[in-house]
Amino acid sequence: MVRKNDLMDYYREPLPDKTPGSKMFNIALQYEENGLVDEAIKVYKDAINEGNLEAAINLGVILMYGNKTDCCNAAGLFLYAASKGLSSGYRNLAQMYIKNILPGGNEAAAEYYLKAANMGDARAQCNYAIMCKNGKGVKKNSAEGIKWLHKSAENGYYRAQALLAEMYYTGDGVYKDIDTAVEWYVRAAENGSPVAAYTLAMMFLEGKDIERNEQFGKQMLDRAVELGYSKADYEAGLIAESENDYVKAVYLYSEGANKGEPGCIRKLYDLGYYDRADNVSSVSLNTDYETE
């Protein structure tokens, strides 16, 4: 079965009827979701023949990670989609170089990220920014990295917004500006960054570098919990426990423990819920920033 999370872009939702080849694409997607990959491949090809670019991306991913691996054809499909205006084609090509599926390494990856970035692809803009900032695949250029990170953030990409917020908060490559950092953290949290929501929560709950605001801090902590961040489960559990709401606390600790949060596992032991603590992993599964 296709490992859909290995690439940045994979079209998981049915397409609107007016999209060229959408009927074939949606049938292929359904086949694939039901594990009928061979049937999906055939119908994706029909969709591509009808001009559907998303089908080219999905078929490329299948060829890379399915049972019938064909990386050259996958790369060709990504290039085809990109040449027709779908920036995710270039972005997926960059991932192939990052993962050493194709020879060329970080230099080739940076080239294709830049192509996608110039097409307005916010994720590619963020990834290219990180490569510039770290000197990975391109000559280190912090100013260029910050420029692309700003573009990505302005285009609504939450990881770029969270990274930009962190830079303003710490003064990394920019003038330290707590107010600007908070603005970007808020935008990132609203757009789905669990790290941004958690960072805001702790800033306002602790009054760290900013006036304490317990109500807003709890609101952001709830947002981080909603987004599945295990550290937020732990902190929210502590608050619930301090308010004598042990049912809520145990629920939050259990959620965090299931994600591998050590603090939550310890709290379950402390509260006597040994069976729950013994049945969870000790490895944290949290990831937020995309660095490749």
Image: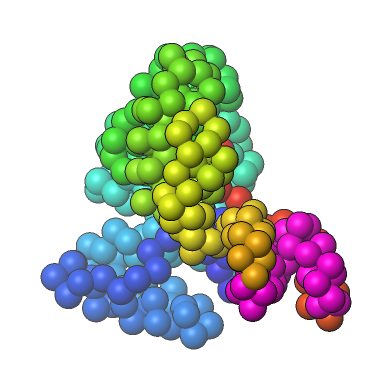
- Of residue 178 and residue 260, the one placed in the foreground of this image is 178
Q: Residue at x 84, y 67 (%)?
A: 270
The scheme the figure's colours follow is rainbow
Please tell me whether residue 79 is drawn above or below residue 27 in the rendered image.
Answer: above
Q: Main secondary structure of the magenta part?
A: helix
Question: Which residues are drawn in magenta?
Answer: 245-274
Query: In the picture provided, is 93 more to the left or to the right than 190?
Result: right
Please tell me whether residue 277 is drawn above or below residue 189 in the rendered image.
Answer: below
State the quadrant of the C terminus.
top right
Work out whether residue 111 can be spotted: no
Numbered-mark total: 0
Please tell me whether residue 268 is drawn above or below residue 105 in the rendered image.
Answer: below
- Of residue 12 and residue 50, the one placed in the foreground of this image is 12
Q: Residue at x 47, y 80 (%)?
A: 33
Instruction: Residue 193: give x, y in percent of width and height.
Output: 46, 49
State the quadrant of the N terminus.
bottom right
Q: Residue at x 63, y 41 (%)?
A: 100
Work out whether residue 87 can be spotted: yes
Instruction: Residue 254: give x, y in percent of width and height.
Output: 69, 72
Instruction: Residue 240: give x, y in percent of width and height.
Output: 61, 65
Q: Quadrant of residue 258?
A: bottom right
Instruction: Residue 224: give x, y in percent of width and height.
Output: 51, 56
| Residue 101: in magenta span | no
Q: Quadrant of residue 44?
A: bottom left
| Residue 251: in magenta span | yes
